[in-house]
Image: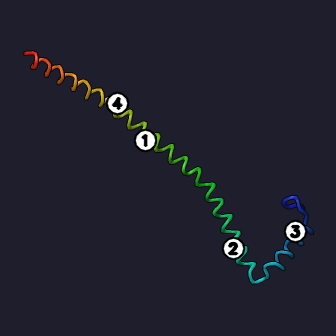
Amino acid sequence: MKILGMGVPELLIILAVVLLIFGPKHLPKLGAAVGSTVKNLREGLGSDKKIEEAEDEIIEMEEEEELEEAPAKKTVKATTTKKVAAKKAVVAD
């Protein structure tokens, strides 16, 4: 059985060295620290997807707003053009 390219004897030697360095009292703290680090790493990698989805939603909303505003702008231009023509007619008289 191989884990990360190492067999069982190699893993046991590494475990014994870690036990000698940190001692049995500090192993639970070390395990908790490693576990929280892995959890934060996974959340960090997953948050990129959430950010991309949020950006896509914002872009879609902006495009929808532009499409809704487009006819309104044409109406404003037509009304403005009529007002300008009426002012020119008044000034010309």
* Residue drawn where x is 50% and y is 45% of the image: 55
**The residue tagged with tag 3: helix, strand or loop?**
helix
Which of disc 2 and disc 4 is earlier in sequence?
2
Q: CA distance from mark 4 to mark 1?
A: 14 Å
Which of disc 4 and disc 3 is earlier in sequence?
3
Image spot of residue 28 (x, y percent): 72, 78
Q: CA distance from mark 3 to mark 1?
A: 53 Å
* Residue drawn where x is 59% and y is 51% of the image: 48
Q: Is residue 41 shown above or below 14?
A: above
Kind of residue indicated by mark 4? Ala
Which of disc 2 and disc 3 is earlier in sequence?
3
Label 3: which residue? 11
Which of disc 1 and disc 4 is earlier in sequence?
1
Q: CA distance from mark 4 to mark 2?
A: 57 Å
Mark 3 vs 2: CB contact within 8 A: no
Kind of residue indicated by mark 3? Leu
**The residue tagged with tag 2: helix, strand or loop?**
helix
Q: CA distance from mark 3 to mark 4?
A: 67 Å
Label 2: which residue? 32
Label 1: which residue? 61
**The residue tagged with tag 1: helix, strand or loop?**
helix
Image spot of residue 59 (x, y percent): 47, 40
Q: CA distance from mark 2 to mark 1?
A: 43 Å
Disc 2 packing (10 Å; few <14; some 14–19; many ≥20): few
Task: Indicate which disc residue 70 carries.
Answer: 4
Q: Is residue 66 left or right of residue 19?
A: left
Work out which residue is located at the far left of the displayed protein and give it. 93
Kind of residue indicated by mark 2? Ala
